[in-house]
Amino acid sequence: MPQIDLSRRAVEYLRMSTEHQRYSIANQRSAIATYAEERRYEIVRSYEDAGKSGLTLKGRDGLQRLLADTLGPFRDFSAIIVLDVSRWGRFQDPDQAAHYEYLCRQAGVRIIYCAEPFVDDLGPMSSVLKNLKRVMAAEYSRELSVKLSRARLQQARLGFRQGGPITYGFRRQLVSEDGQPRQFLERGHQKALRGERVRFALGQEEELATIRRMFELYLRPKATFAGIARTLNDEGIPSGTGGPWQATRIARLLRNELFIGQFTFNKISKPLRGPPIRNPESDWVRVRVSDPIVAPATFKRVQKLARPGGRKRFTDDEMLDRLRHILAREGRLSPALIDRNRGTPAAATYEKHFGSIRNAYALIGYEKPPLRWRPELGGYWTNEAILDGVRAVHADRGYVSAALLEEVKGAPSYATVRKRFGSLRACYELAGLPHRPSDLVLAAHSRRRVRLHGEAATDDMLDALRTVLQRHGRLSTSIVNAAPEAWSASSYVRIFGTLRNAFAQIGYAAPPYVNVRDDGRRTSREFLIEGLKRLLSTHGYVSGKLINQDPELPHEWVYRDRFGSLLEAYQLVGWTLTRGQLNTLGKVVKLGSPELVREAVARAKAGCWAS
């Protein structure tokens, strides 16, 4: 078969940010098509980066894919047509744009800028003009960044919001050019007219009450961000994001000056998509945009406590004196008593400061009892009392876990159970509860499934599996992934623990894994080779994916086990390619059109690969 002529085959690269309509994807494609038709180029493929900045390579999937295909072992084009130098990129270092172009030229691919005045050669005038264009493209972005930064600062001084996620407790209010309120913007909505602006507006009263409660909780002794998050989650207060409260988010909210009605802007800048820069406080913009949600004095106290070392630091003698005071009043000591006592460091602080809580006890002459005292039991935990407590938790909640033991009042703690029996599993077994690892994992996945997706969502996933089973008569990873109505196999694994667990939910028992030495006809050499010949005649090529998708053939690992490798099995049916050529063909099959695949297969058979 004659080798394909690549000299007239080209691809086009299209990029558009948001700066000008004349650079729209449609306009670029039209100009490139006219240029290609006049010079008899055939455009075989398009690479697009719609809505992408040209400042960096990061995020430009189209250009990354183009460079990978250009430098890869298989290539079906000899030229890249771009509208102009600025579409290739507005890199702040002109040498970066030149570097990517050099890589393409070194691989034997020309880059043609069809709207530029210079010709595509390496002459001195073309090189000077091209480098000048690169510098001008970079300078345009720099000047535009300065103008936009100046405009954003001016709009911030007027009290208009400048993008980013909306702060909890606030809403976005759209106003007209003359400042008249129009409407509140929901999540994901944006303003439509250039003259419109967005102001801050107070949110729902429930959110404002939650904010005040955060500040109130943090002013309590021993308060932590994580503790506030746990309190809000336990009380069932929604976070506004659909997920639980997190300590990091609590920390950000407690430091946000919007809650005293003040909008602070330009703390951090990121010019030209570079690394973030923390600006001096003199460059910050502060403007009042609403009434305070919390009192400024309260906000100031919280900021003082939130900074490192903001809470009171105790000396060793002061910490031990407070322990003696608790011991004199209660007659005993425990981490829970220490944490509940106001004006005393947390038990974790004692552990960190003295090495362990027992070391702190020893310094004041207190010896901790060997067993945990339970006032409600009238004594210490006995083994039978612990087992009864665990059984009671399981009867009430339907399961037992370390977190649940800590949560349920009156139940033995996780530390007590582990210290007495060695592990939770041993305790479950002695209590007559499910204790096998498979039972515990399945129960945990079931609880997680209901918590994250609800019963209705998981029922839909199982109904889809039943439909696939009715159509195919069997289920496997490949069949589930190929079925359009089913979720991916990884989704079932994530929700149900394993794919077999999901199959068991609909009453389907997956067959055991095939033993290639005992399977008989389906794994005989003759049967496997005939299957490969059938795939080759039907598709024009063979691959592990085709083998796995064929319901009549076993998994590709059966071929690997029987023949040593897929490559050796392919050679038995006349499909003789090197490993590199197989990898290249797989890439073409994944990304190319059917016509390109057939052409690649024909070239592979003939041994004609592009250099």
Image (cartoon, rainbow, N blue to C red):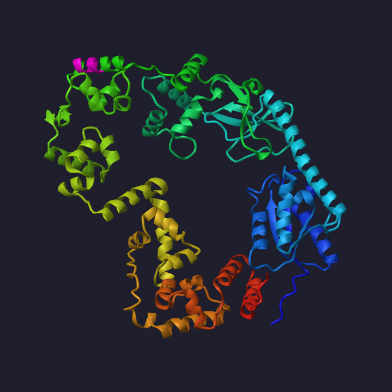
Q: Is residue 542 above or below residue 115?
A: below
* Magenta highlight range: 323-328
Question: Residue 20 placed where, x, y %?
Answer: 78, 45
Quadrant occupied by the N terminus: bottom right
Is 145 in the magenta?
no
Helix, strand or loop for the magenta stretch, by majority? helix
Residue drawn at point x = 57 percent, y = 21 percent: 261
Q: Give residue 339's quadrant in the image.
A: top left
Question: Residue 28 placed where, x, y %?
Answer: 78, 55
Of 185 and 31, the residue lying toward us: 31
> Is residue 29 in view?
yes
Quadrant occupied by the C terminus: bottom right
Question: Residue 155 placed where, x, y %?
Answer: 70, 27
* Left or right of 582, for residue 80: right
> Is residue 176 in view?
no
Residue drawn at point x = 74 percent, y = 53 percent: 25
Residue drawn at point x = 33 percent, y = 78 percent: 517
